[in-house]
Image (cartoon, rainbow, N blue to C red):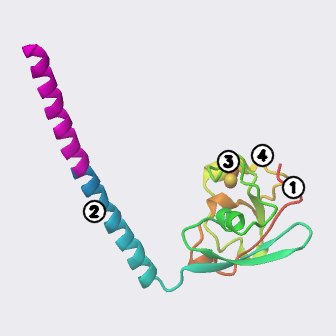
Amino acid sequence: MGCYVHKLRTNIEQIHISTREIFLLANWAGIICKAQLGSTDEHRRGSHQTMAKITYIEHNGTEHVVEVANGLTVMEGARDNNIPGIEADCGGACACSTCHVYVDPAWVDKIPAKEDMEEDMLDFAYEPDPARSRLTCQLKVTDALDGLVVQMPEKQI
Ligand code: FES
């Protein structure tokens, strides 16, 4: 019986410590979250422009001009605005090539260069163009992309 009580007391003490640790962790996480929210707000306030206008042109010529928030990808801009023609089956992991577009020739040299992974994945895209093809999940929206025009292929894969 004594042993049982001792064990119970030990367990209660452990629970007490654990609860305190959880409380401290939650508090700590709250501070971190507030700090991150603060820096995001600061970034928004300090940022000259937080949206970029992007034109998505379907294969049939239908144009969709939307404002996409900086920090999202061009794929997410299409997805969030229900623009057809970009499927993004892998959710942006650069593992499916179904977010393929042709970048307007005027923009080819203005956007960041492809990483090796994107280059490799483009081999699986439908009729890729070595100069103009990009995976929209790999194109992060910034002020520099304001005015970007992309055209969807006839089909994805
Ligand atoms: S969403 Fe799959 S490669 Fe871009």
Q: Amino acid at mark 4?
A: Phe
Q: Say which label, 1 or 4, has the lower sequence index.
A: 4
Magenta stretch in the rendered image: 1-23
Say if mark 4 contacts mark 3, CB within 8 Å: no
Marks 1 and 3 sit apart, C-alpha to C-alpha, by 16 Å
Say if mark 3 contacts mark 2, CB within 8 Å: no
Q: Nearer the viewer, residue 21 or 112?
A: 21
Marks 2 and 1 sit apart, C-alpha to C-alpha, by 47 Å
Whole-percent x and y of residue 41?
41, 76
Look at the numbered disc 3 and say if its residue's Cβ is closer than 8 Å to ligand 1.
Answer: yes
Name which residue lies at 89% across and 66% down: 59
Name which residue lies at 21% across and 51% down: 24
29 relative to 94 in the view: left or right: left
Q: Which residue is mark 4?
A: 124
* Of the two numbered discs 2 and 1 in the rendering, the one whose residue sits closer to the viewer: 2
Q: Say which label, 2 or 4, has the lower sequence index.
A: 2
Name which residue lies at 82% across and 64% down: 152
Q: Secondary structure at mark 4?
A: loop
Q: Which residue is mark 2?
A: 31
Q: Which residue is mark 1?
A: 155
